[in-house]
Image (cartoon, grey):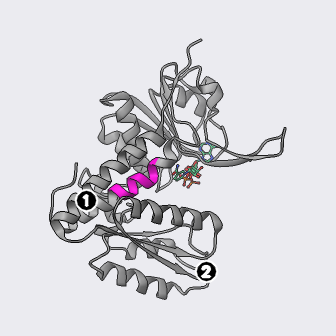
Amino acid sequence: MTIGKIIDGKAFAAGLRDKVALGVAAFAASQGRKPGLAVVLVGEDPASAVYVRNKGKMTVAAGMESFEFRRPAHIEEEELLDLIEELNADDRVDGILVQLPLPAHINEASVIAAIDPAKDVDGFHVVNAGRLATGQDALVPCTPLGCIMLLKDELGDLSGLEAVVVGRSNIVGKPMAQLLLAENCTVTIAHSRTRDIASVVHRADIVVAAVGRAEMVKGEWIKPGATVIDVGINRVTDTEDGKGRIVGDVATAEALAHVRAITPVPGGVGPMTIAVLLRNTLVAAHARAGLPAPE
Ligand code: NDP
């Protein structure tokens, strides 16, 4: 039995961060300032706090300026919108990221809409979503952009390949489908109402799973030789030792016997997300300075 390749997202992300750091140094030398990323954290959610801390550390490690704004969970929406306005007007800030989810009394869509699209390094603003969908230059959501980078590194030209994206969220599934379409794939989006999802997935040369259901995509669903990108992050508890661990949306051990290549969880897509965020910040800094996009 042949076993597929495990795609090393951790190593790829480290290489990308190194490349971004070189771009940051060149930008700072020519512009006399470092690119800056502002991260806004509302509330005390421990997982969000860990993400924000990591983002700050990686931003500084890449040679950029990191600005962190922590606000209590009871902040009024107006106050948060005022903070976004300040950051929009602050020339030291090239990228603004509001850590999601926000507390229930705050309208996430209004907050995202308040971010200057030129600083929207998460790529969630409708202007950037619309630009992506219409083939114009856009700031693209970090996770799907990271997935496409891994796919192109693994497969080269994606033109003509059959791609199935499982999941249709605005932050992963939909932009993922747009990126695959832009690479000339034939794209299907599957979701919770899709009939016979196993046979839909079985058509695919490329499967991207972004569902949030532990090991939902079974090995036998996968066409022999397909490449699988597993975006899912699911915490499960082992029945044997009661210990918690993280698994993806794909039953990796089974899938390995079918795939050409697959991203592991952890160590696949996860590390790409922050690396692409840094790259998006550098891209935004270039665009704001009137410079062509970095390589
Ligand atoms: P959402 O919950 O927003 O979307 C999940 C999607 O999966 C929905 O479109 C839903 O369909 C679909 N779905 C749910 N159940 C089924 C099912 N039984 N069969 C088929 N489709 C189904 O999640 P996200 O897109 O935000 O995230 C998806 C996963 O990716 C999560 O595990 C998340 O933690 C992870 N993630 C990882 C990141 C990383 O950096 N690696 C970054 C972002 C997310 P419907 O629309 O019909 O309800």
Q: Residue 121, percent across and down?
A: 36, 63
Residue 177: x and y in percent read 41, 44
Q: CA distance from mark 1 to mark 2?
A: 36 Å
Say which residue label 2 marks. Answer: 73
Q: Are marks 1 and 2 in contact (CB under 8 Å)?
A: no
Q: Is residue 124 visible?
A: no
- The magenta stretch spans which residues? 272-279
Side of 183 relative to 226 (left or right): left
- Is label 1 in a helix, a strand or a loop? helix
For mark 1, what is the residue?
25
Q: Is most of the magenta stretch helix, strand or loop?
A: helix
Residue 15 placement (x, y as % from top left): 37, 43
**Quarter of the figure with residue 3:** top right
- Amino acid type, callout 2: Ala
Give the residue displayed 22% in from the left and 53% down from the top. Answer: 294
Earlier sequence position, callout 1 versus callout 2? 1
